[in-house]
């Protein structure tokens, strides 16, 4: 399809050779570049936000004594909920008229907001929803790595006079770096393929402000019936993703070799 002009007729698909024409059209498309830019912002924000939140939760739970089993189980609940259900829950929370968030603001004398009606607001809302949904996955990665750190190593650092802050910066975080790097790659892949939240909460709007690559492909393929460009864009997205992952893995291996 990516190398053809594809038409759907009564007898099925018909293919006419187009060479790299579809790729040229995609690279010249403002919609494609907008989707790539939105996706880059979304991935970077959700990756950093979920890693920071997951790291903080893992460190807190690792120190917890009371109700530790309950904390570990409750924190993973959002990750086991289907994305469609998560989207519907947050649609009710963010509704400008009957949403729980605006009702809470009004309780404190603050004015409600149209969270999903402006470009920046809609993107920030979607980023917050995604971080809430997938931080438990990051938490599990980091918490598991944190459990593997020898307590004897930490006690040795304390006996050498290191403060808790120094232990965190110079012992714990360097040992957690491989797990954080791995979960960052997972979050990149999850960010590329995310679809449900955008489709149900904003439908890619307003004015394409939250249209990511997955929805741009869906719109071209199913709405515009532009099969060739949708296929070409899909190949470009997969190629870019693989290149990013290979670069990250290469960098990680180089750093591990030096250390």
Image (cartoon, rainbow, N blue to C red):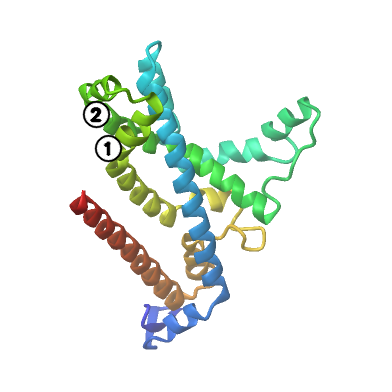
Q: Which residue is mark 1?
A: 175
Q: Residues within 10 Å of mark 1 (few under 14, many from 20)?
A: some
- N-terminal label among 1 and 2: 2
Residue 95 horizontal/vertical position (percent):
69, 40
Picture mark count = 2
Q: With respect to residue 37, does 46 lie above or below?
A: above
The answer to whether marks 1 and 2 mark residues whose Cβ atoms lie closer than 8 Å is yes
Tell me if mark 2 has few (under 14), some (14-19) or many (20+) residues whose alpha carbon lies within 10 angstroms of its own: some
- Please state if 48 lies on the left or on the right of 97 as rendered: left
- Mark yes or no: residue 85 visible: no
Please tell me whether residue 94 is drawn above or below residue 167 in the rendered image.
below
Image quadrant containing the N terminus: bottom left
Give the residue drawn at x 51%, y 54%: 42
Residue 55 image offset from top left, x and y in percent: 40, 34
Residue furthest out toward the front: 161
At x 34% / y 69%, what residue is drawn? 239
Quadrant for residue 72, please give it.
top left
Q: Position of residue 155 (x, y in %)?
A: 25, 20
Whether residue 27 sits left or right of residue 189 in the image: it is: right
Give me the C-alpha separation between circle 1 and circle 2.
8 Å
Q: Between residues 152 and 96, which one lies in front from this camera angle?
A: 152
Q: Position of residue 183 (x, y in %)?
A: 34, 44
The residue sitting at 60% across, 52% down in the picture is 123
Q: Which mark is residue 100?
A: none
Which residue lies most toward the left here?
257
Residue at 39 percent of width and 22 percent of height: 61
Q: Nearer the viewer, residue 158 or 24?
A: 158
Check disc 1 and report its element: helix, strand or loop: helix
Q: Which residue is mark 2?
A: 149
Q: Secondary structure at mark 2?
A: loop
Relative to 239, residue 104 above or below: above
């Amino acid at each position: 399809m990516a190398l053809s002009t594809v038409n759907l007729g009564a007898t099925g698909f018909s293919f006419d050779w187009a060479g790299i024409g579809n790729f040229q059209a995609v690279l010249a498309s403002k919609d494609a570049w907008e989707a790539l830019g939105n996706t880059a912002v979304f991935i970077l924000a959700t990756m950093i936000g979920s890693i920071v939140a997951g790291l903080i939760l893992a460190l807190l739970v690792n120190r917890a004594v009371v109700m530790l089993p309950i904390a570990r189980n409750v924190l993973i609940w959002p990750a086991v909920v289907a994305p469609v259900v998560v989207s519907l829950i947050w649609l009710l929370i963010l509704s400008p008229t009957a949403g729980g968030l605006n009702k809470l603001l009004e309780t404190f004398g603050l004015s409600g907001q149209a969270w999903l009606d402006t470009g920046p607001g809609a993107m920030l809302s979607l980023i917050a929803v995604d971080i809430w949904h997938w931080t438990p996955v990051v938490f599990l990665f980091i918490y598991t790595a944190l459990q593997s750190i020898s307590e004897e190593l930490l006690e040795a650092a304390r006996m050498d006079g290191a403060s808790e802050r120094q232990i965190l910066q110079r012992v714990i975080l360097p040992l957690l770096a491989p797990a954080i790097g791995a979960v960052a790659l997972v979050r990149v892949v999850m960010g590329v393929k995310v679809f449900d939240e955008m489709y149900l909460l904003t439908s890619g709007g307003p004015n394409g402000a939250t249209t990511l690559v997955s929805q741009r492909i869906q719109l071209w393929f199913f709405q515009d019936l532009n099969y060739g460009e949708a296929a070409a864009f899909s190949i470009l997205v997969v190629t870019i993703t693989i290149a990013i992952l290979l670069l990250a893995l290469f960098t990680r291996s180089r750093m591990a070799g030096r250390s």
